[in-house]
Image (tube, grey):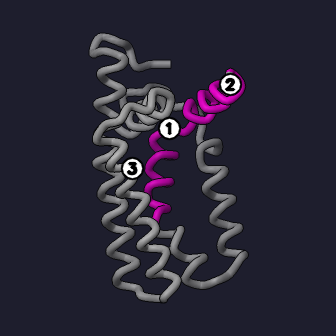
Amino acid sequence: MVAVAGLRRALFARHCNPWSAWTRWASAPLTLVPVWTRRRSHAGLLALWLALNPIVFGKPRHQRAWASRAMLGEELWISDRPRDAAMLLSALTSALWLVGMVAARCRRLRPAMIASALQMALTLVYWERMVRYFDRATGPETPKAQ
């Protein structure tokens, strides 16, 4: 259990870099491509990108950025797993991702794009929840520097 927590901490220490958070968010529509094209090479490239994304960006100089606080809040939230609105948002974004996947499989562009856009929008709402969660957990006076 300690090893998992240490690995999670090491991943989030880098994933809280705003470049990591925003590029991963912007990659959401790309998850539809391998299903649409039915090419394993596209799935492999996407999997490689999503796996490397949290580690290719270095630790941020500070943690004041909104995206950084969202990722750090998510790390805390994953550890605590409270039953709150964020859990519902997470389930809804997952459901929208699944709708997008089904639409991509059927090669229905408009429903796939709408599902992806809604997923991305709800992800931002979820991130806002994570920022609030992080700010509550760390307190307003806690320095957000590493």
**Res 43 → quadrant:** bottom right
Percent from the top left, x then y, of residue 132? 28, 30
The magenta stretch is 2-28
Looking at the image, residue 72 lies above or below residue 52: above
In the depicted structure, whether residue 44 falls above or below residue 138: below
Percent from the top left, x then y, of residue 95? 40, 63
123 left or right of 72 in image: left
The residue that mark 2 highlights is: 1
Could you say which quadrant of the image residue 2 lies in?
A: top right
Circle 1: residue type: Asn
Q: Nearer the viewer, mark 1 or mark 2?
A: 2
Above-or-below relation of 114 to 12 = below
Secondary structure beneath dot 2 equals loop
Asked which secondary structure carries label 3, the reply is: helix
**Mark sitting on residue 17:** 1
Q: Which residue is mark 3?
A: 90
